[in-house]
Image: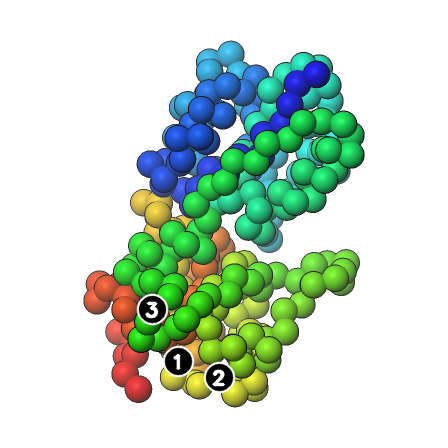
Amino acid sequence: MGKVMLVGAGPGDPELLTLKAVKAIAAADVLLVDALVPDAVLRHARPQARVIHVGKRGGCASTPQAFIEKLMITEARAGHCVVRLKGGDPYMFGRGGEEKAHLEAAGLVVEVVNGISAGLAAPASIGVPLTHRDFSAGAIFVTGHERADGGAGSAPDWAALARTGLTLVIYMGVARCREIQTALLAAGMRAAIPVAVIQSASTPQQAQLLTTLDAMAEDIGRAGLGSPSILVIGEVVRCAAAQAAPLAVSLAG
């Protein structure tokens, strides 16, 4: 009987792989690779390893989750070391918890190798700390994408999040940025609160925008930013490096 490793490939920059991730990739007989994992990461795989691309990306055609899980079980039962290679971290909006439970129910040994999530790498790439003694005592990681089946936890309570006063780090939120903006403003969040939008963090394709909550949706449209992007909303965005904004948007006030 083989085993399955759920491995985080980090936010995109191959140099942000952990040493443990590199070792796992090098040990794999079979790699099931998500769409956001760059090809450079696969250079650590053995030449004889089988690489199967099972793209999972919001807004795009994706390999069915049930098929991915069945494939992992089949390969592991065949005695192979299976690495499920995910962008970011397996346990941060990566369905790692679901996959681990499913695999263990099938009697398999599962190991999780953490990766640097885009929610950490994206703000850091433009000089934004998620916590700061002068601005925020904490950060909240939340998805802006609602489950199609309307299941538990499908819709964030934006009003409750606004009341915390903490930094909001929103994954998969660009497509619904206007709804998020409307909900946060309706909850009483200040219109002038700073916002950063970072697309394709840590990669050569990275693009970013500094704006304010009341202008967020319009500015995202003007800048042409899309998925994959991280939205960071909070006073910590005032720490952003001066060169971070492609649009001349003032964060004064």
Q: Earlier in the sequence, mark 1 or mark 3?
A: 3
Q: Secondary structure at mark 1?
A: loop
Q: Secondary structure at mark 2?
A: loop
Q: Secondary structure at mark 3?
A: loop
Q: Amino acid at mark 2?
A: Met
Image quadrant in which you'd find residue 112? top right
134 relative to 123, above or below: below
**Residue receiving disc 3:** 132
Few, some or many C-alpha atoms within 10 Å of disc 1 (few <14, some 14-19, many ≥20)? some
**Residue receiving disc 1:** 193
Q: Earlier in the sequence, mark 2 or mark 3?
A: 3
Few, some or many C-alpha atoms within 10 Å of disc 2 (few <14, some 14-19, many ≥20)? many
3D distance between C-alphas at marks 1 and 3: 15 Å
- Left or right of 198, for residue 92: right
- Left or right of 146, for residue 16: left
Which is nearer the eye, 51 or 236?
A: 236
Q: Are marks 1 and 2 in contact (CB under 8 Å)?
A: yes
Q: Are marks 1 and 3 in contact (CB under 8 Å)?
A: no
Q: Amino acid at mark 3?
A: His
Q: Is residue 237 in view? A: no
Which is nearer the eye, 226 or 232?
A: 232
Q: On residue 189, which mark appears? A: 2
| Residue name at image x 72 percent, y 33 percent | 103
- Left or right of 26, for residue 33: right
Image coordinates of residue 138 in percent, x first then y, are 44, 67
| Residue name at image x 54 percent, y 39 percent | 86
Please name which of the two marks, 1 or 3, marks the residue nearer to the observer: 3
Please name which of the two marks, 2 or 3, marks the residue nearer to the observer: 3
Which is nearer the eye, 160 or 241?
A: 160
Numbered disc total: 3
Image coordinates of residue 137 in percent, x first then y, are 41, 71
Image coordinates of residue 186 in percent, x first then y, are 56, 86
